Image: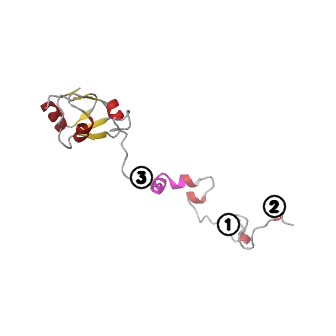
Amino acid sequence: MLSLNTIKPAKGSQKNRKRVGRGNASGHGTYSTRGLKGQKSRSGVSGLKRLGMKPMLLNIPKKRGFKSLKPKDQVINLFDLNKYFKDGSKVNVNILIKNGLVDNPELPVKVLGKGDLKLKNLQLVGLKVSQSVKEEVEKLGGKIV
């Protein structure tokens, strides 16, 4: 009958372990496969002490590059402002979220100068702007707060 206590490994699948230091008749007596003198032949020396730090460092896989902890800006362009706002509008993060131009209120928002601005007296509140956007907004009578 087959039960857990009668299961045996397949013949030849397991080797007997090497028994070192059990006399010369065993074939591994005298120096017990450690060679002659030196630190590595003595007892009480761990493998890690012999290896040291350098080989461990060399074995660890290294990730290349680095990931910045600064959050990336959410980008909107001037043509987006033309599409969603009117003359004299006040633009801030909450209004941009409401219009679906940005997703996350926590991340910073930057207005870039792609396209031409056609809105007069535009107020940009709490947004980062590029130099070209700043010039264009101020040229059309708007301001950046």
Q: Is residue 27 above or below residue 77?
A: below
Secondary structure state at the residue bearing disc 1: loop
* Crowdedness near tag 3: few (<14), some (14–19) or many (≥20) residues, C-alpha within 10 Å: few
Residue 57 as seen in the image, left or right of residue 4:
left
Q: Nearer the viewer, residue 128 or 118?
A: 118
The mark found on residue 30 in the picture is 1
* Crowdedness near tag 2: few (<14), some (14–19) or many (≥20) residues, C-alpha within 10 Å: few
Q: CA distance from mark 1 to mark 2?
A: 41 Å
Residue at image location 80% in from the left, 65% down from the top: 7
Residue under numbered circle 3: 63
Instruction: Give the label, 1 or 2, closer to the camera.
Output: 2
Instruction: Give the label, 1 or 3, closer to the camera.
Output: 3
Where's the C terminus, which quadrant? top left
Q: Is residue 13 above or below residue 75?
A: below
Say what amino acid the circle numbered 2 marks.
Leu
Q: Farthest bottom residue?
A: 12
Q: Main secondary structure of the magenta part?
A: helix
Say what amino acid the circle numbered 3 marks.
Lys
Q: Are marks 2 and 3 in contact (CB under 8 Å)?
A: no
Q: From the top left corner, tell me how far across and down residue 4 is, in percent.
A: 81, 61
Q: From the top left corner, tell me how far across and down residue 125 is, in percent.
A: 26, 27
* Crowdedness near tag 1: few (<14), some (14–19) or many (≥20) residues, C-alpha within 10 Å: some
Question: Of callouts 1 and 3, which one flags the residue occurring earlier in the amino acid sequence?
Answer: 1
Residue under numbered circle 2: 4
* Region of the chain picked out in magenta, as a range: 49-61
Q: From the top left corner, tell me how far across and down residue 2 is, in percent.
A: 84, 65
Is-magenta flag for residue 50?
yes
Q: From the top left corner, tell me how far across and down residue 54 is, in percent.
A: 46, 54
Where's the N terminus, which quadrant? bottom right
Secondary structure state at the residue bearing disc 2: helix
